[in-house]
Amino acid sequence: CCIWGELRGVFACADSLRRLLLDPLDADALVLAQRQLPDDDKRVSLLEDKLFPRLVCVRLYSKPDPGKFFGRAEFEAMAEVRGNWCNAGNIQVLMNHIELGRFLEAEGLFDRYGLMLFTRSDLLHVVPFPSAGDLFQALGSGDIVTQAGHEFGGVNYNLAVMHAKLAREYLRSPFEAVA
């Protein structure tokens, strides 16, 4: 289970992450989030406490500049397309996914795990997740399980579950589309 984004909402959501996602899945957790809030270290401590012993890694990083990240000309060209999703707030989601993909690749985690679950830190889960075995049976190699709503015509990025091989492509795709 990869928890990403900014560490908003962890005070309200940490228990549900553990009880309704990690425990039913018998899953490890990784937190890769942007440093944004003045009490981020307190939020990390809470996650370390609530998600122990399933938490295998926590990394916070500074928000990158989209122009430097994608290339100024490429980013500005994409931002000019009417209706494009590339704006100051939403582009952070794309960069989060790319950073997460790079980290998982560098650490060999795509090869270590069969399934990947991506969730924001501020998503409150209210029902238990299916077991990993049930998900393996239900998911085809190109399938993504997600929740309805908030997808704006694409895949809802707030919660997504897929095979690790597909996750590699899923997380790399924003960079390939913009740059």
Image: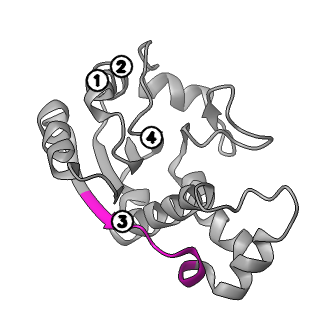
Q: Position of residue 44 (x, y in %)?
A: 19, 46
Using the image as rendered, state which of residue 105 and residue 85 is in the foreground.
Answer: 85
Q: Amino acid at mark 2?
A: Leu
The residue lying at 67 percent from left, 34 percent from top is 150
Q: Secondary structure at mark 2?
A: helix
Do the residues under discs 1 and 4 have CB atoms within 8 angstroms? no
Foreground label between 3 and 1: 1
Point out the tag, 4 or 2, that comes first from the N-terminus.
2
How many angstroms separate mark 4 from mark 2 (CA)?
14 Å
Q: Secondary structure at mark 1?
A: helix
Q: Quadrant of residue 46?
A: top left
Foreground label between 4 and 2: 4
How many angstroms separate mark 2 from mark 3 (CA)?
26 Å
Q: Amino acid at mark 4?
A: Arg
Do the residues under discs 4 and 3 have CB atoms within 8 angstroms? no
The residue lying at 73 percent from left, 78 percent from top is 76
146 displayed left or right of 3:
right
Q: Amino acid at mark 1?
A: Asp
| Up-down relation of residue 170 to residue 107 (above or below) | above
Do the residues under discs 1 and 2 have CB atoms within 8 angstroms? yes
Residue indicated by mark 2: 20
| Up-down relation of residue 122 to residue 40 (above or below) | above
The N terminus: image quadrant: top left
Residue range corresponding to the magenta coloring: 59-69
165 displayed left or right of 15:
right
Q: Amino acid at mark 3?
A: Gly
Residue indicated by mark 3: 108
Q: Residues within 10 Å of mark 4 (few under 14, many from 20)?
A: many
Q: Residues within 10 Å of mark 1 (few under 14, many from 20)?
A: some
Residue 23: which disc? Answer: 1
Q: Secondary structure at mark 4?
A: strand
